[in-house]
Amino acid sequence: MTVEVDAPTVLDKATEAVHDAREAVQTTSRSLAGAIDAGRRPGGLLDQLARLTRKAPLQFLAVAFLLGFIVAQRR
């Protein structure tokens, strides 16, 4: 028993899947870029984080290391 597959149909389905995936990635990228831009505005979370890092880089590095260690312990 042989099953014949219509090559153009399979190619069309694959092309559509790639197109849908590309659209999903673009939408996600735009969403993340918007969130990052909002965080970088004066007073935003990323702006405050950057200021703290400039004021006390070694202390901030120590805190980041400890948080990373705690997260790694849980996994």
Image (cartoon, helix red, strand yellow):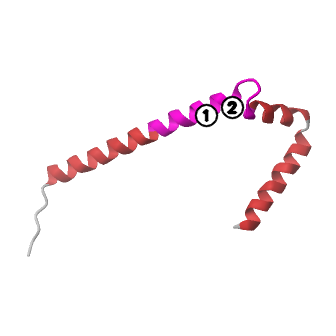
Q: Which x, y percent locates residue 56?
A: 91, 38
41 vs 5: above or below: above
Can you tell which mark lies on residue 45? Answer: none
| Extreme residue toward the top, this view | 42
> Does 31 sit left or right of 49 as displayed?
left
Query: Alpha-carbon distance for marks 1 and 2?
Result: 6 Å
Q: Nearer the viewer, residue 59 or 4?
A: 59
Q: Which x, y percent locates residue 27?
A: 46, 36
Q: Which x, y percent locates residue 51?
A: 83, 31
Mark 2 residue crowding within 10 angstroms, few (<14) / some (14–19) / many (20+): some
Under mark 2, the amino acid is Gly
| Extreme residue toward the bottom, this view | 1
Q: Residue at x 79, y 61 (%)?
A: 70
Q: Nearer the viewer, residue 71 or 44?
A: 44
Mark 1 residue crowding within 10 angstroms, few (<14) / some (14–19) / many (20+): few
| SS at mark 1 in the image | helix
Residues tagged 1 and 2 counted as in contact (Cβ below 8 A): yes
Q: Which residue is mark 2?
A: 39
Q: Which residues are magenta?
A: 26-46
Q: Residue at x 80, y 55 (%)?
A: 67
| SS at mark 2 in the image | helix
Residue 45 magenta-drawn?
yes
Q: Residue at x 42, y 42 (%)?
A: 24
Residue 15 magenta-drawn?
no
Can you tell which mark lies on residue 35? Answer: 1
42 vs 24: above or below: above
Under mark 1, the amino acid is Ala
Per the picture, the main secondary structure of the magenta-coloured stretch is: helix
Quadrant where the C terminus sits is bottom right
Quadrant where the N terminus sits is bottom left
Picture quadrant where residue 32 is located: top right
